[in-house]
Structure formats: structure tokens, C-alpha cells
Amino acid sequence: MRRKPGTLVPIEVSILAAGVALALAGEPEFHGYGVARELKEREEARRLTAHGTLYRALGRLEEAGLLSSRLEAAEIAAAEQRPRRRLYRVTAEGEAALAAARAALPQAGPLQPQRSGV
Amino acid sequence: MTTALVPAGGFVPGLVRRWVRLYCTAMPETARAARQLEIDSDLWEHYSDRLATGLSPALVSTEVLGRMLRGVPSDIAWRIQAEGFHVNIQFPVERIAGLFLLFLIVPFVAGTAISGYDTRHEYWPDEFRRFAGISSHERQLTGMLHGAIGLLTIAGVAILFATVRERSPKLITVACALLAAAGTIMLVNAALYRALSETADEFLATGNSGLASNARALALAIEGLAMMNVTATTSGVLCLAVALVRMAMVPRWTVVLPIAGLAAPVLWIGLGSAFPDSAWWTVAVAFVAVALWLIISGIWLLFGGSSRARPLESVPAHLT
């Protein structure tokens, strides 16, 4: 992917915006499917974000320090009889990057990032 | 890890997991396990969330399958970025080179063999009629065989180039270019031979003597290209021999054989007109010298080359 260093692609803006919105709604941490569902609802998309697109973007954001992640405690997953979730959280750098991306796109509302595409 | 709520044994979740395992092959254990766990969790969440809304399992599976398929390009890109294009595979370089040298005997024999006619025959139409007498099926098979060997040679050269290029870039590049040229000449000759074969069929059906003249031109072109093939092969083999000697992969004395093999056609090109019957001897000397080198070096590399190979500073770690 060719892009200027420090700039975000639409899917990354969408993930950060969804993460911030979830945090504002009282869920500071989110998992992969959770953010895919959030993106679908927020953007009124017809389909959920593809696995490859979603987890590649999450990996890039974490590598850039815009997200942090941790594996949830095994006991919680065991109690709920499901696989352990990787929980992501938008970092302060992520919030700043999102604000900068929104500033560069004045047409986008505070919680209405542009469509992520895939 | 999965529970009864997740259709772990279903076809689509199984397919997604197999795909993850495939593109995570040869990755570091931690990265592979992390991706597998994340997708496993996604599958569980997806099914439990959508089934809870009353969606049928089949429709949820369709959604999951769509997410997997649409993400394939990103998965592949992620995998390449995760480790780069240089996957750490231990190539048995000497064995591959040895196999290639032994295989090279086949195109070398086929390249020097011109089946079914002799252009030096006193009365060409009679010779051409004799050639036309060979069954059409047999002639076509010969042409196809030459074409297939030409293609295999080019493919073999590509593998050799990819395997040993970094050990001696210049010599290996020149050697492979010459051997690939030999393979290409074989392809061209296969096409010309097919044209000659069809001309023979027409000659047999019509008896048109003009066709015999055209056929002689084709036959001479094939003969000339066959000589070029021998020259390209022997030159390529000589470069390869020097490269392998420099890499200490084969004994130094073996290089004498391809030198003799190349000297023969070079001398023929320079002095051939003075010795009209020397073509056969030229081919014979080149053939024996090069074939001997291919056999000796091929067996040497196949059954013991690696223990004698000298490690070179320029050899990348993933090739040693």
C-alpha cells in the first residue's frame, strides 16, 4: 500500500472512529468482530468487513501505536465458553491521528468517517 | 477452544480455519497462533451474534464465506508483509544443480539429433521422399518431443537461475541466458520441423517437385539452428562449469571437457568450409565432451557436492 507516512486510509479512520465511539458509549475495549459489526451499523454497509481487510488494518494501527491490544483473561473466555478475544483500545496517539484525519476531511462529521470500502 | 455454540465442525468455519493455517504456514509460532486465535474468536462471535438475531445458520455461513473470500488479497498481502518475499526455505542447491545437469543431457541429445533426413544426400528429392515415407504420426511426435524438451529446458534453467544465481551472479546469468537460448532454439526448430513434416505430407500427396526445394531450405535452416543450439548449449555449459569450479562445487579439472566441447563447433564455424565432411565429427566431439561433463558433474553434485562446497561470503544465509 503506497501512502504518505502518517496518513490513514479510510478503513483505519473508520476503525479509530468506531473505537472512539464505543469508548464514549462505555466500551473502551473492542474485539475484531465487534468493530466489524460497529462499522457495518455506523456506515449502513451491506456487508461486514472482510477478515483479511479488518485484521490487516487492526495490525497496522497497532504497529503504528494508534491502537493497543491485549488478550483477555482465559478464565473469562472459559466461563463464557468461547475463544479468548483480543481486545483493542484506541490510544491517545490514535485519537490525535483520528482528529487530524477528520481535520483534513472537513466534510466528515465528528462520528461519521468516510466509508471504509471493503 | 471452541464450544458447542460455535459450529466448529461446519464446512465454512473449517474452510476459514484451513485458509488461515495455509497462509500462516512457516510463520513464527506466536504470530501464527495469534492470527488463528483472532479468527477463531471472530468466527465464534459472528455465528453467535447473527444466530441470536434469528438468521439461519446457512445464511450466516454465507456471510462468513464472503468475508473470507473478500479478504483473501489482504491476507496474502499481510502474509508477504509479515515476512517479506524471502521465505526461509533450505534449498538443496547442489542437488538441484546436479539434477539439472543430468537432465540437460536430454535436450543436448535431442538438439543434436536431426531425425529422418540428410541434407548432404546427392539427390535431395529422393532423400525427401524417403523422409516423407516416415509415418506422419512419427514425424509429428518427434517435433512435439523437441518442443517439450525446449520448454523443459527453459523451465529447468529458470529453476537453476533462481537457485544458484546469488552465488556467482554474472557467470550464472550468462550461463542461464545461453541455455535458455538453446531451449528457445529447440522450440523454433520444433516449429520448423513441423512445417517440414507438413510439407512432406503435401509432397507425398501431390508429387510437386517445387515443394522439395522449399523443404530443403527448411531442412538446412533446421540444421543451422541445431548447430546454433549445440554452440549455445556448450557455451552455457562452459560458463556453468567455470561458475561451479569457482564455487568449488565440482573438481577443477572437469572444466577441460566443456572447453573441448566449445572449441569443436567454434573451429567448425571457422574452418568448416575447408573440411566439408567435418560437421559430423564436430557434433560428435562437442557432444561427447559436454555429455561427459554433464554426467560427471551431475553425479558429483547429486551424491557429494555439498560436503565439498566452499562457503562463500556472498552466499546469503538462507541459501547456505
Image (cartoon, coloured by chain):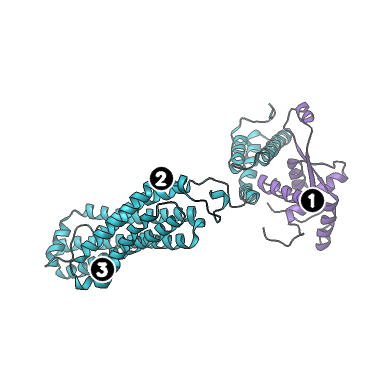
Residue B274, quarter of the rendered image:
bottom left
Q: Which chain corresponds to the colour purple?
A: A
Q: In the image, B209: left or right of B186? A: left
Q: Chain ID for label 3?
A: B
Q: CA distance from mark 3 to mark 2?
A: 34 Å
| B234 lies above or below A60 | below
Disc 1 is placed on an element classified as: loop
Residue B299 in percent (x, y) is at 37, 46
Disc number placed over residue A65 in the picture, else none: 1
What is the quadrant of the N terminus of chain B in the image? top right
Q: Is residue A91 left or right of residue B248?
A: right
Q: Position of residue B164 (x, y in %)?
A: 48, 54
Mark 2 secondary-structure assignment: helix
Query: Quick check: marks 3 and 2 in contact, CB under 8 Å?
Result: no
Q: Chain of mark 1?
A: A
Provide the residue designation for mark 2.
B302
* Residue, disc 3: B268
**Picture residue at 38% right of the left edge, 63% below the top:** B181
